[in-house]
Amino acid sequence: MNVIAPDAAQPDLQAVGVAKRYGSFHAVDDLSFSVTRGSFFSILGPSGCGKTTLLRMIAGFLSPDSGEIHIGGKAMGGVPPNKRPVNMVFQHLALFPMMSVGDNVGYGLTRRGVARDEIRRRVGEMLERVSLPGAQDKRIEQLSGGQKQRVAIARSLVLEPTLLLLDEPLGALDLKLREHMKIELKQLQAAFGTTFVYITHDQSEALVLSDRVAVMNQGRFEQLGTPQELYYAPQTPFVAGFVGANNCVKGRATLVEGDIVTVTSVEGLAIPARAMGSVRTGHAAEAFVRPEVASLSRAASAFSQGGLPHYRAQVESLLFDGANSAVLLREEVSRAEFRIALPQTGQFADLQPGETVHFGFDPQRAVCFAS
Amino acid sequence: MLMLLLAPALLWLLGLILLPHVELGILSLRARVAPRVYEPSLAQYRTFIDEPLYWHTFVRTAILSILATAITLLLAFPIAWTIAKIARGRAKSLLFVMCLIPFWVSETVRTLGWMILLRESGVLPGLLVSLGITAAPVEMLYHDATILVGLVYTSMLFMVIPLISALESLDDSLIEAAYDLGGNGWSILRKIIIPHAAPGMVAGCIVVFMLTLGNYLTPTLLGGKNSQWFTEQIYTQFITRFNWEQGAAFGFLLLGLSTAIVWLGLKLSGQRFGEVMQRS
């Protein structure tokens, strides 16, 4: 029990040089980071990047080979999962099918030896807070996917943990429900104020939900920042490629003008873009142009007047997806494929495959890296 | 069409289960008043109650069978747990085959194996003497404990198999979740694992109990003349005394006993027969 009021500046989770190896494979490679109290922190990465290993080390199911994990300011070395102020929402929720909803939510309190009446009261309150009032006597299989999700969160939050860990809890849901639960999770986190650590391979989940996101790859954090920073100012090619859709052109840096570097591919496609880090002339580089950064025009003059780089291309196919509609183009000289977002004005509603169009973009809004 | 498909099973049920039981039922409910003269009577059942040896043997068989079933469950649970949850890949199949291999040998031979190990001039008493634990070889056969050892050994596989399938279907993340929420080993066993495995456990117990109660060979060989197993009484009536009426009555009493105990076991464990039988 905390007698002294915890310092607000004290991070709820702090990792110092945490590493986990399996043989010569570095699942988690010397990670250090901290998570502010009350924030929503996501770890985003492809499968096999080590995010689950990291989460299981925080929960206490695995112990790090080196480094330390502090939760609520206390070192967690040697503390088993059932003694940590941390609870986890499992990937497939792991609700206890042999118990009622009320017993599921009350399980942790029972283990702590809380009096029966007190458990009943707190379970009732918690179910009300997750919009499932009076569901105590229901069986788990009677619940819908979204309701199960809420029970799993209620079961953890009723214990008032310092940290709530979530292991891709939306992965098993269908698309519509996933979109809905995303919003619900964010609202729940705001209402409870508990620090959430969320792992996912779905960049949209991470961007929508989080205050801060760590993009993880091969056991390391490629970049840690707000969703906006990751999206608009990726620090590594991996982040640029993984977060959001992106058109990538690989080649050599042929011209450096201030912070704008022109990357020219073997096929002769020259893309000017803002350099992230140092990119030197003649060195291998890759440029990224987001679909919504580029714009379309039927006339080249629309770009040449503003002095923007522009290209002629043929429409390969139209990718209609409501507000996310895009067009797939093939640049005329290099035959490189480009995905460009269609504006919502209906201006290009009559676009046909095979048609020749122009596209261009502001080099300041494209990025390039030495590779 | 359905009748045609079911015909072999129905013939089997009718010819080998139903008809003999009807015949035995009629036999058990008559008494011989003169050579080849019979009249309906409850005399066979009255003899069972009046003769203490018979119902002592009956109760003793029931208690020892329940005990053997309980011991089998206790021993089989960690084995099934190891095979279902801990062992991986080759080790898993190897352990399973190790449980299975003894059953390639007939029960008689396996029981004789125990006799070679346990008899006074056998391996184990000899070992105890050479280790200086006992001064002279001890007779380890013909005790109740010996019968239990034999019965548990014979029954093990029939408990391990339903337990493995029950435990394998338990999602590991349920155990982790319970641990994460503050549970410890004992409470997780009691609240998560046992409720999940209960149908499999009950299925294994029913099979083992029935096999044990109806076992003739193991109690006779390992318990000797004093084994006092109820199946021996039935054998004696039918074969030695040629008193089929009495033997039939004993057979029905044993059937009633196993039915009653299985029913009681299902009631006490709160399981349904249909669900349990699907697991066995």
Image (cartoon, coloured by chain):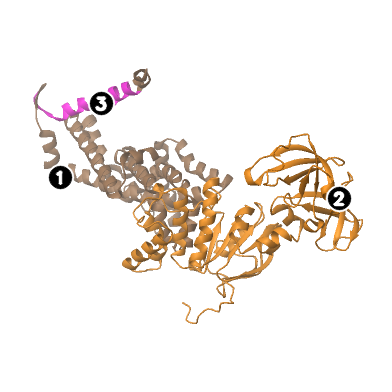
Badge 3 density bin: few <14, some 14–19, many ≥20, Cα 10 Å: few
Circle 2 residue: A304
Amino acid bearing label 3: Leu
The numbered disc on residue B132 is: none
The magenta span reads: B9-34
Instruction: Judge from the rendering whether residue B198 lies leftward or rightward of residue A312; answer left or right.
Output: left
Amino acid bearing label 2: Ser
- Tag nearer the camera, 3 or 1: 3
Circle 3 residue: B18
Please state which of residues B95 and A31 is positioned toward the viewer in this rendering. Answer: A31
Q: Is residue A153 visible?
A: yes
Distance in Å between CA atoms under marks 2 and 3: 97 Å
Amino acid bearing label 1: Pro
* In this view, B255 is above or below A130: above
* In this view, A36 is above or below B163: below
Circle 1 residue: B52
Labels 3 and 1 touching (C-beta < 8 A): no
Badge 1 density bin: few <14, some 14–19, many ≥20, Cα 10 Å: few
Which chain is represented by orange in the image? Answer: A
Which secondary structure lies at badge 2?
A: helix
Please state which of residues B236 and A176 is positioned toward the viewer in this rendering. Answer: A176
Please state which of residues A221 and B50 is positioned toward the viewer in this rendering. Answer: A221
Distance in Å between CA atoms under marks 3 and 1: 31 Å
Q: Is residue B35 visible?
A: no
Which chain is represented by brown in the image? Answer: B
What is the x, y in percent for residue A290?
74, 51
Please give the name of the residue rendered at 38% of the width and 38% of the height, measured from the top-left corner.
Answer: B278
